[in-house]
Amino acid sequence: MKRRSLLQRFAAAPHIAWSVLFIIIPLLFIIYYTFTDASGGFTLENLSTIASPEYLMIFLRSVMFSILATVICLLIGYPLAYRIASMKPRTQRIAIVLVMLPMWLNFLIRTYCLKILLNDQGIINTFLGNFGIEPLKLLNTSGAVIFAMVYNYLPYMILPIYTVISKMDQNLLTAAADLGCNRFQTLTKVVLPLSFSGIMSGVTMVFVPSISTFYISDAMGGRTFSLIGDTIERQFKEADNYNVGSALSLVLMILIIISMSIMNKYSDDDGGVVV
Amino acid sequence: MQDNDGVLIRLENVSKSFDGEVILDHIDLEIKHNEFVTLLGPSGCGKTTTLRIIGGFVDADEGHVYFEGKKINDVPPYQRNINTVFQRYALFPHLNVYENIAFGLRLKKMSDEEIRDKVKSMLAMVNLKGFEKRSVTALSGGQQQRVAIARALVNEPRALLLDEPLSALDAKLRKDMQKELKEIQKRTGITFIFVTHDQEEALSMSDKVVVMADGRIQQIGTPVEIYNEPINAFVADFIGESNIVTGIMPRDYVVTFAGHSFQCEDAGFAPNEKVDVVVRPEDIDIVPLDQAMLTGEVTSVTFKGDYYEIIVDIDHFKWMIESTDRVNAGDIIGISIDPYEIQVMKRSEYSDTFGDYSSFSDEMDELSDPAPEEME
Amino acid sequence: MKKVSNIYTALCFLILYAPVAVMILFSFNSSDSIFSFDGFSLQWYKSILNGGEAVDTLINSLVLAALSAVISTVVGTAAAIGIFHMKHKWIKNATMQVTNIPMMNPDIVTGISMMLLFITVGTLIKANILGFGTILIAHITFSLPYVILSVMPKLRQLDPNLTEAALDLGCTPMQAFLKVELPAILPGIISGMIMAFTLSLDDFVISYFTTGASFKTFPTYIYSLVKKPFKPNIYALSSIMTVAVLVLLIISNVISARGESSGKPAKVKKQRRTRKEAQE
């Protein structure tokens, strides 16, 4: 083997110590709290608590909302990413800056702004009111929650897809056209399969924060559409029930790991989505 | 410090394996002052590893490395008075030409004037006057090569190691650089240790060629010795074109192959010992049938410019002959071989591994010698 | 066809920017309502100059971001070098897997897991340790994988011969690192540092669980206001930040466009959970 200098040999040591202390041990705490009660004795009660219909409903809702948000992001984001990638290089850069810019706004403020837009006395309803249309109930609906998820996480879908499409070898598209594909066929037969890895990272980058989000559904759904994130937050910050909170977190983690491995199954080696 | 017979570097019983695979198998090698030595061999033969052990980038598992009589196994590269020209030059992209060359001198805390003088004279030597301020990334391959050589030589090392330095250049530039390198070596009197897989390059530049295969040194000698008196079938096949056949030495100075007994100049084998015989294609004469030692049918003729490359089927063994005589495919021709053109070799593990020229083509030859770089 | 796609693109951007427009509009509101616009005024921008909790917490956030970015860049760069040179593949893979956990895990899980640790330690030493120290640890922890992942590709691109050439020319391994390797991987280190800085500045979820009453960041401060309606001065601050970021992005784009005329995409602010890079 090559000689390794002292630096190369021990440079990772602080990081490894750090990771054990602040990544692995905290995760062990979650497991510990999941299987103990308030006095520290072993119990499975926390898990049976969250197996109740009430919690199952929350899990189911979270999964459905986040899947919906992910699919909508994909449907909106893919055409946009494709369109941006086909712009002139200068315009492309500007467009991508514009896609990223709203992400620099704190997500609490972003969500709050959405709330103002959709409020009963908000801009949209005021605008519609000018035409004598009764105020629509936009806020505090499941639609509002999903819309806020889409709005918050759409850039995470656009960016990886755009990156893959823009790096695509243009000769492939020319070749497809040469072999008789029209523009639509080029898209479905060449661009889409080749951008699969981008889609996969986009889906992951939208799905994971969507399923674990808190605040969004509180703000947009008026606490009527609680999701896993909100429930976990409440266990820790309001109910002071760390044990049930930990159990919920553990199940959420496992849920995500399972969905990731399912996605892995469907993505090729170059799909690049690995848990 | 002992200086035995001008030996600069000595490898003694050096072995090295990577991941259980033996790369160097007990190598012994002596390199003298002012010598141009080439380590020649196919990919994976261990030549680059040998170079890297001398440079100090790889530790030998076993054996000793001596430099000017002192053991240097544990001396790190930066304390060895040896410099290297790397295969892809390894110029520092964040420094310009001047600063790349001055790099080693600055580490020695030399004064600015001294550095300027040395860098100037180096640039002049490698024909890059006026390139001081250029970015190294903007240079052509040949220019980068020169900067790399200047950067190494400016430190006035006792030995310069060159790891396939010409492999990235095109054929024409390569020829020029070969001459130039040889010139520089003569002028500076520094020992050059040059690694290549190109036998032509090795033969035309070196004072001494070290042929390596399978982690072992097969033969060490001057280019003429290596070409004319290959020690075994591997060396014979690797260096130039050769017809290698199996024969028997009934007694000294006589060897029998292809059903005919030939006079030769070799002796010292056991009576009736099985041997390998090498005859170079250009050493075979086409003669009228009544004077022929062997006869055969011409199967193909390729015009090569200054000669014809003729494949002759003699008793189902395809011989290659290079001749200026014009023959046609299908002709029956006679050939004769002079005693001094026959090289008799001991049998080795490489015997019978090289066939005749029945499936020969230039392309095949290239395929069998693929990677220009050794993956080690 | 072209027309349809242009309208579509415009519509997408319109929706993407509607809330931003709302925010900027209301930052000029003359009343303190954040729902109805009652007239143009610069009072909220003036109020920022007078300080107040919004400005204080923003400064907190900037200090925290700078500190955690510097520490995670130093530790992360060293880690990347160490991991890159690891001899055994399985140790390397295991280390990378653990490194990536904070990036893969939902923020809320990362947040509460660390909170559990901090609270337990706090109970052991009978003190409430949630505050600047704990939030700094948390931010360093979730920044580390991003630094490592942006340095690692530069190390991989680094021609090993460069280091050897430096040693060959007389550098000690330390000098070779400082004079040759560091300049070569510097772009990766800087982009890692920028990423760590912005992630820290932007983070709410993990901060929310790992800090205490003694130290508020700008996002946790906003959250504390959400329950009571907050004033447009928050919008004014955010508008200033958005414009500042826009200017920075444009400058960095102009520079990168000058540096290389190829159509290289702008730096992505957050590359959260792009597992592609996470793969060795």
Image (cartoon, coloured by chain):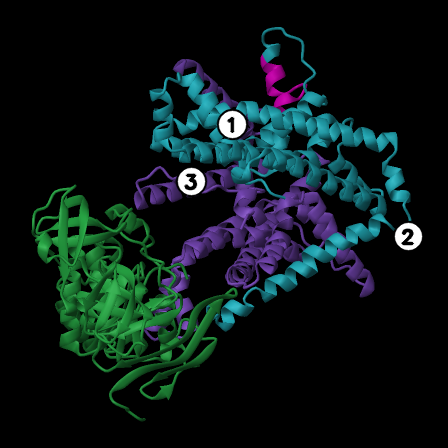
Chain colours: A cyan, B green, C purple
> Percent from the top left, x then y, of residue B239?
24, 62
Is disc 2 placed on a helix, strand or loop? loop
Which residue is depicted at the point 51% across and 26% down? Answer: A78
Amino acid type at image mark 1: Tyr
Q: Which mark is residue A42?
A: 2
| C103 is within the stretch colored magenta | no
Which residue is depicted at the point 74% across and 41% down? Answer: A254
Compute the Cα span from label 2 to label 1: 51 Å
B242 is higher (above) or lower (below) than B361: below
Q: Which residues are magenta?
A: A115-127
> Percent from the top left, x then y, of residue B225?
20, 72
Read off the chain for label 1: C
Read off the chain for label 2: A
Discs 1, 3 touching: Cβ within 8 Å: no
Q: Label 1 belongs to which residue? A: C17
Q: Quadrant of residue C184?
A: bottom left
Q: Dot 3, crowdedness within 10 Å: few (<14), some or many (≥20)?
A: many
Q: Label 3 belongs to which residue? A: C266
Compute the Cα span from label 1 to label 3: 19 Å
